[in-house]
Amino acid sequence: MSICLIHTGGTIGMARTSRGFAPKAGIVEDAVAKLRANGEQREEVEILRLDPLIDSANAGFTDWNRIAAAIEERHERVEAFVITHGTDTMSYTAAALCFALEGLNKPVILTGAMSPIGQQGSDGLRNLSDALDSSLVSGPGVWVQFGGKKLHGARLRKSHSSAFDAFESPIEPRAPLIRAPWLTRTAYGAPEIAALSMAPGVSPKVIASVLEQCEGVVLRAYGSGTVPESKTLRRALIEARDRGVPVIAVSQCAEGGIALGTYAAGAMLVDADVVDGRDMTVEAAYAKLAHAMSYGQDFASRRARLAQPLCGEATFPA
Ligand code: ASP
């Protein structure tokens, strides 16, 4: 069995510098060698370092494409993939890989650490070892192995900024992948998209001007899908739809999700053909929006892709 470890950066492979922790080449490579020397890792591990290593705060569509392309190139030859990645945007990358790799037929396990692997008491070696083990026994799909838990790649949320048990995902029966007879990669373009959050007193004019400049938007609505009943906001959403700008709404609540149409205060979202993001995380909705922008060429096909269940990213009615 052969495993390909794709190292992208993140705390797991960082060292202290005068400006704070930053990625350093060789740390993750040495950790894999240590696991092999200890007999904790017996399988062949090919390590691919995606230079420059980054803090995942710097990740963008190009980084998602580089990881997905590296998987695509080795998909036939390698049995499993482990990706070492920063935790700050791991939820976005995991979801982005689910959407980009239609027909994925191998386990892809993302992991990282809250403390650099070389630091006393770090969680890095355990997470790395768990991820390598998990890659041998998991089914195809994008999973995250972290803090002793295996989590669904399209449902992931970083819920703690310092605890070792930093991630959560709800139980999801569908595997984190889009089923297809063979692998097809949809590359991310460079869409001008944004995630906008509603807040009491937020200026509808500001929201409207952002909507005017965007090609697609994730709207973080309240509760089960309400927004302030402002004429300016309503007009901006209708105009965005008429310009072909897809908008997907998700809830600011961590659980439960939205159900558009429940309240009159959310009626403008229905009127403006905003997609009901249900209980999708904002991270998954953002990645799905970026994916839909490349997948479809016009408003109808992009909106349809956004509304379609793909890889267990949300709870859709049966
Ligand atoms: N800032 C780091 C990153 O996301 C945090 C981490 O890896 O835990 O790259």
Image (cartoon, rainbow, N blue to C red):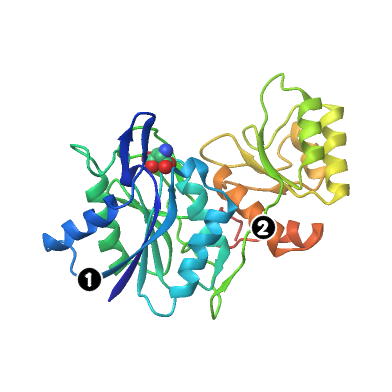
Which label belongs to residue 189?
2
The quadrant holding residue 105 is: bottom left
Looking at the rendering, which quadrant does residue 252 occupy?
A: top right
Position in image of residue 18 (x %, y %): 35, 29
Q: Which residue is mark 1?
A: 43
For marks 1 and 2, the one nearer the N-term is 1
Quick one: quadrant of the N terminus? bottom left
Q: Residues within 10 Å of mark 1 (few under 14, many from 20)?
A: some
**Vertical side of 108 occupied by 218: above or below:** above
Residue under the image location 34 percent in, 46 percent down: 24
Judge the density around disc 2: few (<14), some (14-19), many (≥20) Cα neighbours within 10 Å.
some
Judge left or right: residue 52 versus residue 267.
left
Residue at the extreme front of the image, as rendered = 18
In the picture, measured across the screen, residue 227 lies left or right of residue 165, that is right
Where residue 266 appears, x then y in whole percent?
75, 35
Q: Quadrant of residue 88?
A: top left
Foreground: 11 or 23?
Answer: 23
Q: Is residue 281 visible?
A: no
Name the kind of residue labelled 2 in the image: Gly
Q: CA distance from mark 1 to mark 2?
A: 36 Å
Q: Residue at x 25, y 62 (%)?
A: 133
Q: Is mark 2 within 8 Å of ligand 1?
A: no
Q: Secondary structure beneath disc 2?
A: loop
Q: What amino acid is found at the position of numbered circle 1 in the picture? A: Glu
Whole-percent x and y of residue 186? 62, 66
Taking the spot 37% from the left edge, 75% from the top edge, the residue there is 78
